[in-house]
Image: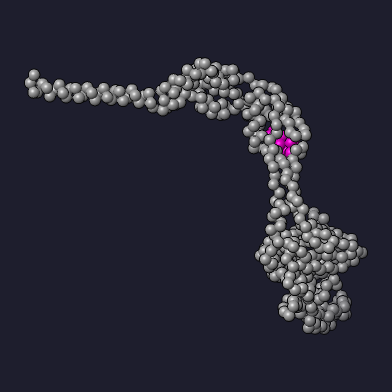
Amino acid sequence: MSANSKTISLTTLILLLIVVAVISYAATWQFVKVRTEDVLPDGIYVGSIKVGGLTIPEALVKVEAKAPMPDRDIELVWSGGSYRLDIDKFKPELDLARIEMELEHVLPHGTFFERLYYKRDLKKSPKKVNIAYRFEEEAFNKLTAELDERIAIPPKDAEFVVNIFDQVSISQEKYGLKVDYNKLLTDLPHKYSYGETVIEVPTVVVAPNYTREDLLAFGIRGIVASFSTQFSLDNPNRVENIRLAAAALDGTILKPGEEFSFNAWVGPRVAELGYKEAQVLLAGGEITEDIGGGVCQVSTTLYNTALLSGLEIVERHPHSRPVSYVPAGRDAAVAFDYLDFRFINSQSNYILITAEVMGDRLLCKVFGSPLPSQIRLTTENMEEVPFQTVKGTTPRPGKTGLRVETYAISGSQKKLISQDFYKPVDQVVL
């Protein structure tokens, strides 16, 4: 054999070996390659419907045509009660999307041999996908509301409790219970698909906003200051307005550095909230009837309590002339749309504000960290300002004006709080 012939034979052999290697690699790859087949194998059922040999879209068409629509009712049960559910109200229908997802999970997957063994096992032990149903969500909303009326227990926050000696304690919180809507929305159709007719209502524990440990950390240990004012019981409308505003204020808790707004906290004084017409003092000094008359006595009482507590006053307005229930210079007028009373909790701990009507008195208290020394208020440098006499068509008596300074005294320190001027009211003569 010539050298040339030997070279050709060697080249041919090498090419042959390469071809064989490629073919062997391709054949081996087919055995080890991981893939998912498109056709459902024999031994797969949806309910009692055989779907082996079909693609998933073909199987869904067959299931939609042959799947029964059961009409069995469900009994929902919970500790202490039960509820018979008329399933027709939920308009059950096939959940083809869920069935499709379940069928995707049973398609042959893996290497050639893994898929082969899987198909072989299905012949011995067929696999059933449950017929899934879905219910109308609006009916679920109504069901949940009805179940909540029967099952739900509202949580109860821990609360500060103040006894007649102004000692502060804290009540224990209580956890609540409500229907777990999301779980019920998932579980009910799913368990119904499995043929269950008695289903336990899923519930979830509802935590309170404040626990006893939370309130202990607030540092409210005792009374800081209190102040009361007196009112007449002869005007029931005014008394009711005072009571409503005090009730809205009672139980206010402020964290360190938090600002309090009387208007924001107490809210609008409107008839829809129960406020009534009573006497109010206008900017010009006249008295008239308006919704919410008397609420200024609540803001004034709180203002004095805040001063005695050493809190930082941000906004305060005097009336057009002195009021009868506090010394001049110590009133705080409010009007929901333009006059507010605001202060900041300048203590290092939380504070609790209480307000209570007791007979003919309104009592406000601030609880927190007791002050190192008691604060007292004093009014000084009072100066009367005489009124002028003018002519007019409607006679009116004049009222003397007043200048006054208010101070807060704590230990050896004396601090100017306000300098107020109550304008005189002109006397009108014919």
Query: In which image quadrant can residue 382 be found?
Result: bottom right
Of the 4 image quadrants, the one containing the C terminus is bottom right
Query: Above or below — where is 323 with respect to 390?
Result: above
Q: Please report the bounds of the magenta region as a residue range.
A: 139-148
Confirm whether residue 248 shows in the render.
no
Of the 4 image quadrants, the one containing the N terminus is top left
Name the spot of residue 126 as percent of width and height, x first: 54, 18
Query: Above or below — where is 70 with respect to 79?
Result: above
Task: Please give the name of the residue rendered at 74% of the width and 50% of the height, measured from the top-left corner.
Answer: 173
| Residue 371 part of the magenta-drawn span | no
Query: Above or below — where is 254 with respect to 75?
Result: below
Confirm whether residue 112 shows in the render.
yes
Predominant secondary structure, magenta span: helix
Query: In which image quadrant can residue 73 be found?
Result: top right
Q: Is residue 228 left or right of residue 134?
A: right
Name the spot of residue 39 as percent of width and height, x first: 47, 21
Name the spot of residue 146 as percent of width and height, x first: 75, 36
Name the spot of residue 19 as percent of width and height, x first: 25, 23
Q: Nearer the viewer, residue 154 or 272?
A: 154
Task: Please give the name of the residue rendered at 8% of the width and 23% of the height, measured from the top-left corner.
Answer: 3
Q: Nearer the viewer, residue 179 or 285?
A: 179
Q: Is residue 127 left or right of residue 19?
A: right
Task: Please give the name of the residue rendered at 21% of the width and 24% of the height, measured from the top-left corner.
Answer: 15
